[in-house]
Image (cartoon, coloured by chain):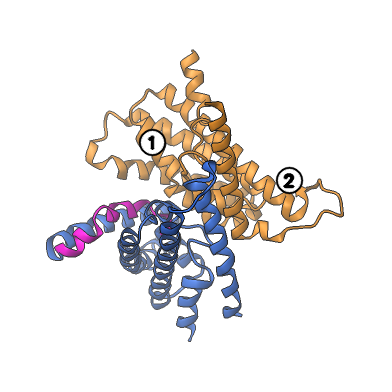
């Protein structure tokens, strides 16, 4: 039981997919201009990760080794298409804001990475736990980044005003450079905390 | 004139790496020295050029007429993956020096989001065949440019004194941020 719990929480901090493995960086930087986009991207990734880990750990014994990457990508692309069509139908404005970054989940290294490193070697139950943990770690990091950038650039968080009026607005934070700066500093903080623990 | 604008737009103004954040994994992975960066850059240009032509034909001549657009992502990624495999075999057989030069970078390109991203932008912006090819050439050149600049800077960074938590990824992101800031200066060219 303790072991299962460990598989679940490892993605939050110790093996955080973004801050430690530097996986899935394109969506991390591109969609975190505000907290809502970040949350949408996070949930989409959790959905795709959950089902692709589930299917891949179910079929892992049937797939020949040489074609495994291609088969994994087809499984992943199928679920990404489902998410894309769902968002287009139900949340057209969100879908428009995220643009090509939803279909780009297909080549998000987190999903293929977890399929290759974990789901193709472990039981269905553990793979699901791994998917949920990694997905949540990813989502939390996205929301932190989106939150920081939204607060500094617009003074709002999830569209609710949080800063006093005299606080200057740093528009550069929602532009590409702001994304790189925020991520660089977060990686630095994560490393500093890990170093202190030792 | 229009073609020139598309090229400059993709290569400099909306640089794939620094303003769309596409292809960041190889950008961070192989920008450690200039030689690797050059190999990767040219491999990407090459694959982009071929995949833009092939995916354009597949999208407009097969998927659209037969009403199969929902298969777009599956089809595109399969095309790119098999194309990379094919290019690898072709080079190995007919141009061995180039094959050895590109080495392990060829297979890695399959998961480079810049390639899939480029094909998606091509469809979203409704480029015609020639425009698509020029767009892919611009995007590839922009990738090479960013990679070269970054690897030049990183060779310098290696010899300087950086606070420990920021060594490696941290300082690289902050450097990329500065580069992105500089590239924003080009935004005036298009308007």
Between B41 and B111, the residue placed more toward the observer is B41
Q: How many marks?
A: 2
* Residue located 31% across and 58% down the image: B36
Residue B116 horizontal side relative to residue A34, left or right: left
Between A70 and B43, the residue placed more toward the observer is B43
**Chain that appears orange:** A
Q: Colour of chain B?
A: blue
Q: Is residue A49 above or below residue B135?
A: above
The Cα–Cα distance between marks 2 and 1, rounded to whole angstroms, is 32 Å
Q: Give the farthest residue toward the left.
A: B93
What residue did someone put label 2 on? Answer: A158
Q: Which mark is residue A115?
A: 1
* Residue located 82% across and 53% down the image: A167
Is residue B104 magenta-colored? yes
Q: Chain of mark 2?
A: A
State the SS at label 2.
loop
Q: Is residue A17 above or below residue B23?
A: above
- Magenta residues: mostly which secondary structure? helix
Pointer 2 and pointer 1 on the same chain: yes
Q: Which residues are magenta?
A: B96-114
Q: Chain of mark 1?
A: A
State the SS at label 1.
helix
Q: Give the farthest residue toward the right.
A: A165
The image position of residue B165, as x and y in percent, is 54, 41
């Amino acid at each position: 039981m303790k072991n299962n719990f460990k598989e679940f929480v490892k993605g939050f901090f110790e093996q955080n997919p973004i801050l430690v493995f530097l996986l899935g960086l394109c969506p991390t930087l591109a969609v975190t201009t505000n907290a809502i986009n970040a949350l949408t991207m996070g949930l989409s990734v959790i959905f795709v990760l959950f089902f692709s880990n589930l299917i891949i750990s179910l079929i892992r014994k049937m797939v020949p080794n040489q074609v495994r990457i291609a088969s994994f990508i087809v499984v992943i692309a199928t679920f990404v298409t489902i998410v894309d069509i769902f968002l287009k139908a139900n949340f057209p404005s969100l879908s428009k804001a995220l643009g090509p970054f939803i279909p780009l989940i297909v080549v998000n290294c987190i999903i293929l990475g977890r399929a290759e490193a974990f789901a193709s070697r472990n039981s269905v139950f553990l793979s699901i736990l791994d998917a949920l943990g990694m997905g949540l770690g990813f989502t939390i990091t996205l929301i932190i980044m989106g939150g920081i950038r939204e607060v500094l650039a617009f003074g709002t968080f999830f569209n609710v005003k949080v800063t006093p009026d005299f606080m200057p607005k740093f528009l550069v934070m929602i532009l590409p450079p702001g994304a790189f700066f925020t991520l660089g500093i977060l990686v630095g903080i994560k490393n500093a905390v890990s170093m202190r623990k030792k | 004139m229009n073609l020139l604008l598309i090229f400059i737009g993709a290569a400099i103004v909306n640089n794939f790496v620094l303003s769309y954040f596409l292809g960041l994994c190889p950008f961070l992975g192989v920008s450690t020295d200039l030689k690797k960066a050059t190999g990767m850059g040219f491999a990407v240009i090459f694959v982009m050029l071929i995949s833009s032509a092939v995916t354009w034909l597949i999208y407009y001549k097969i998927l659209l007429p037969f009403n199969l657009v929902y298969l777009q992502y599956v089809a595109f990624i399969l095309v790119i993956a098999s194309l990379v495999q094919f290019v690898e075999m072709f080079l190995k057989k007919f141009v061995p020096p180039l094959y050895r030069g590109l080495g392990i970078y060829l297979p890695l390109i399959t998961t480079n989001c810049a390639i899939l991203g480029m094909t998606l932008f091509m469809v979203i912006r409704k480029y015609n065949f020639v425009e698509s090819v020029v767009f892919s050439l611009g995007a590839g050149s922009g990738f090479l440019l960013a990679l070269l600049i970054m690897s030049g800077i990183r060779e310098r960074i290696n010899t300087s004194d950086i606070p420990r938590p920021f060594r490696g990824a941290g300082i690289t992101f902050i450097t990329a941020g500065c580069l992105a800031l500089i590239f924003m200066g080009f935004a005036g060219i298009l308007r």
